[in-house]
Image (cartoon, rainbow, N blue to C red):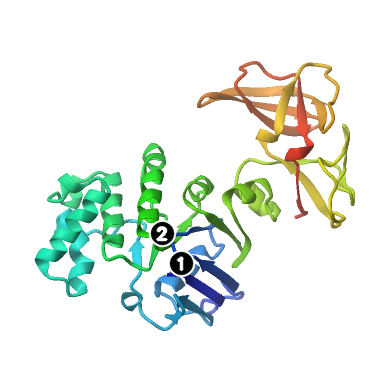
Amino acid sequence: MTLHLSDIGFRYPGAAAPTLSDIDLAVAPGECVALMGASGCGKSTLFGIVAGFLRPDTGRVMLDGRDVTGLPPERRGLGLVPQQYALFPTRNARDNVAYPLRLRGVARRDAAAMAQDALAAVGLGEMADRFPDALSGGQRQRVALARATVFAPPALLLDEPLSALDPHLRRELRAELRRVQRATGAACLIVTHDADEAFALADRVAVMEAGRIAQLDTPACVHAAPATLATARFTGPVHRLPGTVGPDGAIETPWGRLPPAAPRPAPVPPGRIALVRPEGLARRPAGAASLPGELVLSVVAIDSRRQGGAFVHEVVAAGETFQLVDGDPRPPDSIAVRASSVMLVPGA
């Protein structure tokens, strides 16, 4: 079923400004959309409106064409995985998962069998008799996911589903969560402040800023072509190239002119600034000349450190600090900025 938010607006009592404005979003069956943004952007409020915990001042929440805006959470039929999982400590895993089935009038024996199948689907079939305090954080997360999907809900809502886990376990469970969500065929909405998590789980990402959706696109497009400076910074390390951007997209920098990677179909709007991510930089030998489509900068290395299987080099060029990530432990003498990696966004 399709989840559709239309013209959602909301203001907390006494607030000087609205928390949400003009929110329009549709999530198709089987699709996963992540609501992502910094603290205070409105993503949790929007999540609460979809779940039924809050009522919007304007707009509608539609579920497969049915207006559920005025319905309480229990009448919306949504699968919900809260941030802390909210498992009953006095019920074993099977009974926790069976709980929403029993609320819907499913016979105890049938509910237990369906719960057992749901636990098996998340790899916990042999732990059905364990209580929450005998489960690890990752196992509790899987129980909560099984509980949210056991009754085949039309849509899934996940509130920071992996935030309570250690980093290595979060990475491990992303694929599991995505697999289960796809198997349900349900529309899925995830709230997260973690860009890596959003990019790993979602088909599309809705980046929120000041109560509005600043950008809605695939993870690859949001990362490579952010709509705003705030989005660029939130979705990964980014460096600003000093200089001015011309109507044709060429950048006049202290090191020279960097032509655009390709002709632009329309003039670049005024006031744009140029950004580049660390992966858009490349090591060059000392004194190397710029090749077509790049600009070479002589640099002074100020720090080098290992990060995972790569090395991170902090370098300075004409007073600007850049970060180069590659597999070479030696500090670079020069770096090249690739025109194809430059992003143009509105200035702050």
First in sequence, mark 2 or 1: give its number.
1
Q: Residue at x 56, y 62 (%)?
A: 41
> What kind of element bears circle 1?
helix
**Label placed on residue 345:** none
Amino acid type for the residue under numbered disc 1: Phe
Q: Position of residue 18 (x, y in %)?
A: 59, 75
Quarter containing the C terminus: bottom right
- Camera-nearest residue between 41 and 287: 287
On-image quarter of the N terminus: bottom left
Q: Secondary structure at mark 2?
A: strand
Residues at circles 2 and 1 in contact by the CB criterion of under 8 Å: yes
Counting other residues with Cα less than 10 Å from the Cα at mark 2, is it few (<14), some (14-19), or many (20 or more)? many
Residue 279 percent across, percent down from the top left:
66, 34
What type is the residue that disc 2 sits on? Asp
**Numbered label tally:** 2
In the image shown, does 158 or 241 lie closer to the viewer?
158
Answer yes or no: is residue 271 visible: yes
Residue corresponding to mark 2: 159
Residue 280 higher or lower than 50, as above or below: above
Query: Does 5 sit left or right of 178 as displayed?
Result: right
* Image position, residue 313 (x, y; %): 65, 25
Q: 16 or 258, which is in the foreground?
A: 258
Looking at this view, name the residue that lies furthest to the left. 109
Q: Is residue 210 visible?
A: no
Residue at the image point whose x is 81% and y is 40% from the top = 261
Badge 1: how crowded within 10 Å, few (<14), some, or many (20+)? some
* Label disc, if present, on residue 47 of the rendered structure: 1
